[in-house]
Image (cartoon, helix red, strand yellow):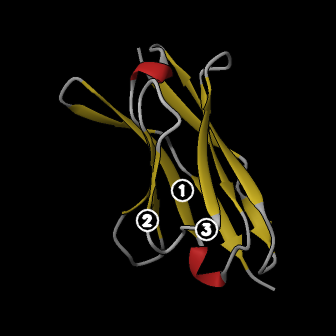
């Protein structure tokens, strides 16, 4: 059974930083493209970042380029999203995801609130 569990969210002031983690069990996360999405209150779930399988190649949404970085720890089977220079508009629930077979799998999400 594949499980994805996010952690690391919280309340941070504008300009601050957070690192989100996504612990994956049941599969070797290295073999999958690892994705981060977010959903703001009243909004749709939107793409944030991808790290390509077996590589460190990243793809980032334009809204977070230069501020966010996605990475993976193969030994810990964990995805990370490093978020710097956070802005109020980054406030959202953040989800990690992989596609296993024809199914997109999601974690439960972790809340990030950027406010002074």
> Residue 1: horizontal and vertical position, in percent?
41, 14
The reply to whether the C-beta atoms of the residues labelled 2 and 3 are less than 8 Å apart is no
Residue that lies at the very extreme toward the bottom in this rendered image: 116
Q: How far apart are marks 1 and 2 (CA)?
A: 14 Å
Tell us which disc is closer to us: 1 or 3. 3
> Residue at left 43%, top 65%?
61
| Residue identified by numbered label 3 | 66
| Residue identified by numbered label 1 | 94
What secondary structure is found at the residue carrying circle 1?
A: strand
> Residue at left 47%, top 76%?
41
Q: How far apart are marks 1 and 3 (CA)?
A: 18 Å
What secondary structure is found at the residue carrying circle 3?
A: loop
Q: Nearer the viewer, residue 82 or 112?
A: 82
The mark that comes first in sequence, 2 or 3, is 2
- Tag shown at residue 61: 2
On screen, residue 12 versus residue 54, left or right, reads: right
Tell us which disc is closer to us: 1 or 2. 2
Q: Which of 67 and 94 is in front in this view?
A: 67
Dot 3 crowding, Cα within 10 Å, few <14, some 14–19, many 20+: few
> Residue 34: horizontal and vertical position, in percent?
44, 37
């Amino acid at each position: 059974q594949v499980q994805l569990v996010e952690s690391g969210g919280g309340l941070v002031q504008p300009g601050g930083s957070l690192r989100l983690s996504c612990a994956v069990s049941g599969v070797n996360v290295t073999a999958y493209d690892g994705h981060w999405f977010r959903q703001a209150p009243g909004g749709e779930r939107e793409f944030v970042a991808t790290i390509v399988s077996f590589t460190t190649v990243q793809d980032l949404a334009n809204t977070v380029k230069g501020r966010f970085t996605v990475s993976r720890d193969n030994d810990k089977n964990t995805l990370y999203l490093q978020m710097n220079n956070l802005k109020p508009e980054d406030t959202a629930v953040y989800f990690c995801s992989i596609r296993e077979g024809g199914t997109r799998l999601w974690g439960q999400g972790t809340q990030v609130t950027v406010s002074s």
